[in-house]
Amino acid sequence: MSTTTTTTTATTGDRVPRGDVVAPLHFYVPPTDGSTPFNNVDPPPGVPERNFSYQTLPITIHDIRGQETSFTLENDAFQILSNLPPSAEEDPSKNGSNFTSDASISENYYPEVTSLLLNTIPGSSKVIIFDHTIRRTDPSSPRGPVQRVHIDQTAFSTAQRVRRHASSPEEAEKLLQGRYRIVNVWRPLNKGPVESFPLAFASSQTVKDEDIVPVEHRYKDGYTGQTAGVLHDEDQKWYFLSGMTGDERVLLECFDSWAGKEGLEEGKKVKGGRVPHTAFEDPRQRADAEGRESIEVRALVFGP
Protein backbone atom coordinates (compact mmCIF):
# COMPACT_ATOMS: atom_id res chain seq x y z
CA MET A 1 0.00 0.00 0.00
CA SER A 2 1.41 3.40 -0.90
CA THR A 3 1.22 6.43 1.33
CA THR A 4 1.60 10.14 0.71
CA THR A 5 2.72 12.89 3.03
CA THR A 6 1.19 16.30 3.52
CA THR A 7 4.46 18.00 4.51
CA THR A 8 8.19 17.47 4.47
CA THR A 9 10.58 17.96 7.38
CA ALA A 10 10.19 21.40 8.89
CA THR A 11 13.71 22.78 8.55
CA THR A 12 16.86 22.02 6.57
CA GLY A 13 19.04 19.66 8.56
CA ASP A 14 16.22 18.55 10.89
CA ARG A 15 16.44 14.77 10.94
CA VAL A 16 13.02 14.46 12.56
CA PRO A 17 9.89 14.17 10.37
CA ARG A 18 7.65 17.15 11.16
CA GLY A 19 4.13 18.18 10.25
CA ASP A 20 0.98 16.26 9.37
CA VAL A 21 1.45 12.96 7.59
CA VAL A 22 -0.56 10.19 5.97
CA ALA A 23 0.74 6.89 7.31
CA PRO A 24 -0.53 3.29 7.59
CA LEU A 25 -2.29 2.34 10.83
CA HIS A 26 -3.47 -1.17 11.69
CA PHE A 27 -7.06 -1.49 12.94
CA TYR A 28 -8.92 -4.38 14.57
CA VAL A 29 -10.94 -6.83 12.46
CA PRO A 30 -13.20 -9.24 14.44
CA PRO A 31 -12.98 -13.06 14.27
CA THR A 32 -14.69 -14.40 11.16
CA ASP A 33 -16.62 -17.02 13.18
CA GLY A 34 -18.15 -14.48 15.57
CA SER A 35 -16.37 -15.95 18.61
CA THR A 36 -15.06 -13.95 21.57
CA PRO A 37 -11.79 -12.28 20.53
CA PHE A 38 -8.73 -13.25 22.54
CA ASN A 39 -5.03 -12.51 22.72
CA ASN A 40 -2.64 -14.98 24.40
CA VAL A 41 0.42 -13.43 26.04
CA ASP A 42 3.57 -15.45 25.22
CA PRO A 43 1.62 -18.58 24.21
CA PRO A 44 3.35 -21.99 24.18
CA PRO A 45 4.00 -23.73 20.83
CA GLY A 46 0.80 -24.77 19.09
CA VAL A 47 -1.40 -22.22 20.88
CA PRO A 48 -2.56 -19.35 18.64
CA GLU A 49 -1.53 -15.84 19.68
CA ARG A 50 -4.93 -14.40 18.69
CA ASN A 51 -8.13 -15.26 16.82
CA PHE A 52 -8.73 -11.89 15.14
CA SER A 53 -6.89 -9.88 12.52
CA TYR A 54 -6.03 -6.34 11.44
CA GLN A 55 -6.56 -4.19 8.38
CA THR A 56 -4.06 -1.55 7.29
CA LEU A 57 -5.43 1.84 6.26
CA PRO A 58 -3.83 5.18 5.31
CA ILE A 59 -4.68 7.70 8.04
CA THR A 60 -3.99 11.42 8.34
CA ILE A 61 -2.08 11.99 11.58
CA HIS A 62 -1.81 15.61 12.71
CA ASP A 63 1.38 16.93 14.28
CA ILE A 64 0.50 18.87 17.46
CA ARG A 65 3.98 20.34 17.95
CA GLY A 66 3.30 23.95 18.96
CA GLN A 67 -0.24 23.09 20.11
CA GLU A 68 0.70 20.88 23.06
CA THR A 69 -1.56 22.62 25.58
CA SER A 70 -4.68 22.34 23.39
CA PHE A 71 -5.45 18.76 24.48
CA THR A 72 -6.59 17.53 27.91
CA LEU A 73 -7.50 14.31 29.67
CA GLU A 74 -11.05 15.60 30.17
CA ASN A 75 -11.65 16.26 26.45
CA ASP A 76 -9.25 13.97 24.60
CA ALA A 77 -8.01 11.34 27.12
CA PHE A 78 -4.44 12.38 26.32
CA GLN A 79 -2.33 15.27 27.54
CA ILE A 80 1.19 16.52 26.80
CA LEU A 81 3.54 17.62 29.59
CA SER A 82 6.71 19.56 28.75
CA ASN A 83 9.90 20.92 30.35
CA LEU A 84 10.12 18.26 33.03
CA PRO A 85 13.36 17.82 35.00
CA PRO A 86 15.68 14.85 34.45
CA SER A 87 14.83 11.70 36.36
CA ALA A 88 16.94 10.37 39.23
CA GLU A 89 16.91 7.16 37.21
CA GLU A 90 19.26 8.91 34.75
CA ASP A 91 21.66 10.13 37.47
CA PRO A 92 24.53 7.74 38.31
CA SER A 93 25.21 9.69 41.53
CA LYS A 94 21.76 8.59 42.75
CA ASN A 95 22.35 4.96 41.75
CA GLY A 96 20.17 5.35 38.68
CA SER A 97 20.40 2.57 36.12
CA ASN A 98 19.35 4.75 33.18
CA PHE A 99 16.23 2.63 32.72
CA THR A 100 18.00 -0.74 32.50
CA SER A 101 17.01 -2.21 35.90
CA ASP A 102 13.40 -2.86 36.91
CA ALA A 103 14.28 -2.54 40.59
CA SER A 104 16.02 0.80 40.04
CA ILE A 105 13.12 2.09 37.92
CA SER A 106 10.71 1.18 40.73
CA GLU A 107 12.91 2.93 43.31
CA ASN A 108 13.78 6.08 41.35
CA TYR A 109 11.19 6.63 38.64
CA TYR A 110 7.94 5.39 40.19
CA PRO A 111 7.91 8.08 42.93
CA GLU A 112 8.44 10.75 40.27
CA VAL A 113 5.53 9.40 38.22
CA THR A 114 3.33 9.32 41.31
CA SER A 115 4.12 12.96 42.10
CA LEU A 116 3.63 13.96 38.48
CA LEU A 117 0.15 12.44 38.35
CA LEU A 118 -0.92 13.86 41.71
CA ASN A 119 0.30 17.33 40.71
CA THR A 120 -1.14 17.22 37.20
CA ILE A 121 -4.57 15.61 37.58
CA PRO A 122 -6.90 17.90 39.55
CA GLY A 123 -8.50 16.25 42.56
CA SER A 124 -6.38 13.10 42.43
CA SER A 125 -5.60 11.77 45.90
CA LYS A 126 -4.09 8.32 45.43
CA VAL A 127 -1.93 6.61 42.80
CA ILE A 128 -1.09 2.90 42.55
CA ILE A 129 1.54 2.05 39.93
CA PHE A 130 1.16 -1.56 38.88
CA ASP A 131 3.72 -2.09 36.09
CA HIS A 132 5.90 -0.62 33.38
CA THR A 133 7.24 -1.65 29.97
CA ILE A 134 10.47 -0.67 28.23
CA ARG A 135 10.30 -0.71 24.45
CA ARG A 136 13.27 -0.57 22.10
CA THR A 137 13.27 -0.87 18.31
CA ASP A 138 16.36 -3.11 18.49
CA PRO A 139 15.31 -6.62 17.29
CA SER A 140 17.04 -8.14 20.34
CA SER A 141 14.80 -6.20 22.73
CA PRO A 142 12.07 -8.22 24.50
CA ARG A 143 9.49 -5.52 23.66
CA GLY A 144 9.34 -3.29 20.60
CA PRO A 145 6.93 -0.52 19.58
CA VAL A 146 3.38 -1.88 19.20
CA GLN A 147 2.09 -1.05 15.72
CA ARG A 148 -1.56 -1.98 16.31
CA VAL A 149 -4.33 0.41 17.29
CA HIS A 150 -5.49 -0.56 20.78
CA ILE A 151 -6.56 0.57 24.24
CA ASP A 152 -4.76 -1.08 27.14
CA GLN A 153 -7.75 -1.57 29.46
CA THR A 154 -11.55 -1.74 29.49
CA ALA A 155 -14.10 -0.89 32.20
CA PHE A 156 -14.08 -4.56 33.27
CA SER A 157 -10.29 -4.90 33.46
CA THR A 158 -9.85 -1.55 35.23
CA ALA A 159 -12.20 -2.59 38.05
CA GLN A 160 -10.38 -5.92 38.13
CA ARG A 161 -7.06 -4.06 38.47
CA VAL A 162 -8.41 -2.04 41.39
CA ARG A 163 -9.41 -5.23 43.19
CA ARG A 164 -6.06 -6.85 42.38
CA HIS A 165 -3.79 -4.00 43.48
CA ALA A 166 -5.65 -2.37 46.39
CA SER A 167 -4.34 -3.21 49.85
CA SER A 168 -7.49 -5.13 50.79
CA PRO A 169 -10.90 -6.13 49.39
CA GLU A 170 -12.47 -3.49 51.64
CA GLU A 171 -10.21 -0.74 50.29
CA ALA A 172 -10.91 -1.86 46.72
CA GLU A 173 -14.67 -1.63 47.12
CA LYS A 174 -14.33 1.79 48.72
CA LEU A 175 -12.10 3.03 45.89
CA LEU A 176 -14.56 1.72 43.29
CA GLN A 177 -17.27 3.96 44.77
CA GLY A 178 -15.34 7.08 43.71
CA ARG A 179 -13.65 8.20 40.53
CA TYR A 180 -10.97 5.81 39.28
CA ARG A 181 -8.88 5.72 36.13
CA ILE A 182 -5.92 4.05 34.50
CA VAL A 183 -3.38 6.50 33.12
CA ASN A 184 -0.20 5.51 31.29
CA VAL A 185 2.76 7.87 31.52
CA TRP A 186 4.77 7.55 28.30
CA ARG A 187 8.19 9.07 27.65
CA PRO A 188 11.03 8.50 25.18
CA LEU A 189 14.43 7.32 26.39
CA ASN A 190 16.46 8.42 23.35
CA LYS A 191 19.22 10.94 24.05
CA GLY A 192 17.92 13.11 21.23
CA PRO A 193 14.47 13.68 19.75
CA VAL A 194 12.48 10.66 18.58
CA GLU A 195 13.15 10.08 14.89
CA SER A 196 11.35 6.79 14.25
CA PHE A 197 8.16 4.96 15.24
CA PRO A 198 6.48 7.87 17.04
CA LEU A 199 3.32 7.35 19.07
CA ALA A 200 -0.07 8.25 17.56
CA PHE A 201 -3.23 8.79 19.60
CA ALA A 202 -6.86 9.51 18.70
CA SER A 203 -8.84 12.13 20.59
CA SER A 204 -11.29 10.23 22.79
CA GLN A 205 -14.18 12.54 21.92
CA THR A 206 -13.91 11.48 18.23
CA VAL A 207 -14.12 7.75 19.00
CA LYS A 208 -17.54 6.11 19.23
CA ASP A 209 -18.29 3.46 21.85
CA GLU A 210 -19.17 1.02 19.09
CA ASP A 211 -15.64 1.40 17.66
CA ILE A 212 -14.19 -0.22 20.81
CA VAL A 213 -14.25 -4.01 21.14
CA PRO A 214 -13.20 -5.83 24.36
CA VAL A 215 -10.54 -8.49 23.76
CA GLU A 216 -9.66 -11.14 26.35
CA HIS A 217 -6.01 -10.81 27.35
CA ARG A 218 -4.90 -14.22 28.61
CA TYR A 219 -1.75 -14.77 30.68
CA LYS A 220 0.17 -17.98 31.39
CA ASP A 221 -0.63 -17.81 35.10
CA GLY A 222 -4.34 -18.06 34.38
CA TYR A 223 -5.14 -14.38 34.84
CA THR A 224 -7.45 -13.00 32.16
CA GLY A 225 -7.84 -9.28 31.68
CA GLN A 226 -9.19 -7.25 28.82
CA THR A 227 -7.67 -4.93 26.29
CA ALA A 228 -9.65 -3.30 23.49
CA GLY A 229 -9.37 -3.52 19.74
CA VAL A 230 -10.40 -0.45 17.79
CA LEU A 231 -12.45 -0.47 14.60
CA HIS A 232 -11.68 2.24 12.08
CA ASP A 233 -14.15 5.09 11.65
CA GLU A 234 -13.80 8.15 9.43
CA ASP A 235 -14.72 10.47 12.32
CA GLN A 236 -11.67 9.54 14.36
CA LYS A 237 -9.05 12.30 14.62
CA TRP A 238 -5.45 11.16 15.00
CA TYR A 239 -2.46 13.09 16.38
CA PHE A 240 1.23 12.74 17.25
CA LEU A 241 3.94 14.96 18.75
CA SER A 242 6.93 15.14 16.44
CA GLY A 243 10.43 14.83 17.82
CA MET A 244 9.50 14.05 21.42
CA THR A 245 12.36 14.47 23.88
CA GLY A 246 13.16 13.12 27.35
CA ASP A 247 11.71 16.16 29.12
CA GLU A 248 8.25 15.51 27.64
CA ARG A 249 5.53 13.05 28.64
CA VAL A 250 2.27 11.86 27.11
CA LEU A 251 -0.47 10.94 29.57
CA LEU A 252 -2.68 8.28 27.99
CA GLU A 253 -5.97 7.66 29.79
CA CYS A 254 -7.12 4.08 29.21
CA PHE A 255 -10.29 4.35 31.29
CA ASP A 256 -12.16 6.93 33.37
CA SER A 257 -15.13 5.90 35.50
CA TRP A 258 -16.52 9.42 35.08
CA ALA A 259 -16.74 9.16 31.29
CA GLY A 260 -19.99 10.77 30.19
CA LYS A 261 -20.61 12.17 33.65
CA GLU A 262 -20.08 15.70 34.91
CA GLY A 263 -16.40 16.56 34.94
CA LEU A 264 -14.37 18.71 37.27
CA GLU A 265 -15.67 21.96 35.81
CA GLU A 266 -19.36 22.63 36.32
CA GLY A 267 -21.42 21.93 33.23
CA LYS A 268 -18.68 19.98 31.43
CA LYS A 269 -18.40 16.24 30.91
CA VAL A 270 -15.54 13.81 30.48
CA LYS A 271 -15.56 13.04 26.76
CA GLY A 272 -14.94 9.36 26.30
CA GLY A 273 -12.17 8.82 28.81
CA ARG A 274 -10.29 6.22 26.74
CA VAL A 275 -7.62 6.83 24.11
CA PRO A 276 -6.75 4.54 21.18
CA HIS A 277 -3.05 4.66 20.43
CA THR A 278 -0.34 2.98 18.39
CA ALA A 279 3.22 3.34 17.23
CA PHE A 280 3.47 4.04 13.51
CA GLU A 281 6.10 4.05 10.81
CA ASP A 282 6.41 7.54 9.38
CA PRO A 283 7.12 7.16 5.64
CA ARG A 284 9.42 10.20 5.88
CA GLN A 285 11.77 8.70 8.47
CA ARG A 286 15.30 8.00 7.29
CA ALA A 287 16.33 4.40 6.65
CA ASP A 288 19.11 4.81 9.23
CA ALA A 289 17.03 6.79 11.74
CA GLU A 290 17.82 6.08 15.38
CA GLY A 291 15.52 3.43 16.80
CA ARG A 292 12.91 4.69 19.23
CA GLU A 293 13.30 3.77 22.91
CA SER A 294 10.57 4.45 25.45
CA ILE A 295 9.06 3.56 28.80
CA GLU A 296 5.39 3.50 29.74
CA VAL A 297 4.33 3.34 33.38
CA ARG A 298 0.77 2.22 34.10
CA ALA A 299 -1.04 3.63 37.11
CA LEU A 300 -4.40 3.55 38.81
CA VAL A 301 -5.42 7.11 39.73
CA PHE A 302 -8.15 7.81 42.28
CA GLY A 303 -10.12 10.96 43.10
CA PRO A 304 -11.76 13.28 43.52
Image (spheres, rainbow, N blue to C red):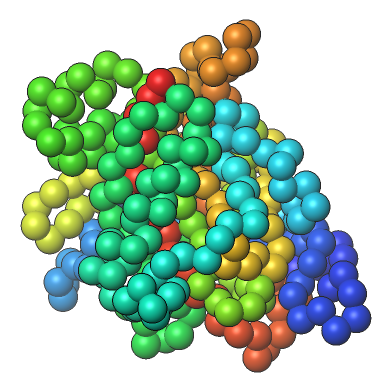
Where on the picture, by quarter, is residue 179? top left
What is the x, y in percent for residue 131? 28, 55
- Position of residue 34 relative to residue 219, above or below, is above
x then y, percent, for residue 156: 28, 32
Q: How many marks?
A: 0
Image quarter where the N terminus lies is bottom right
Residue 50 visible, this orientation: no
Q: Residue furthest top?
A: 267
Q: In screen coordinates, is 255 left or right of 83?
A: left
Residue at 28 percent across and 42 percent down: it is 128
Q: In the orientation shown, which residue stands out farthest toward the right?
A: 12
The residue closer to the viewer here, 237 or 24, is 237
- In the image, taking residue 64 as reference, residue 54 lies left or right, namely left
Residue at image location 32% in from the left, 76% down from the top: 95
Query: Which residue sits at x=72%, y=48%?
Result: 68
Q: Residue at x 58, y 79 (%)?
A: 191
Furthest residue in direction bottom, as rendered = 288
Q: Which of the 4 quarters of the picture holds residue 5?
A: bottom right
Q: Quarter of the image for the C terminus: give it.
A: top left
- In the foreground, 100 or 199: 100
Q: In the displayed structure, does residue 245 sit left or right of residue 123?
A: right
Residue 101 spot, x, y in % from top left: 28, 75
Q: Is residue 128 above or below residue 282?
A: above
Residue 255 or 104: which is nearer the viewer?
A: 104
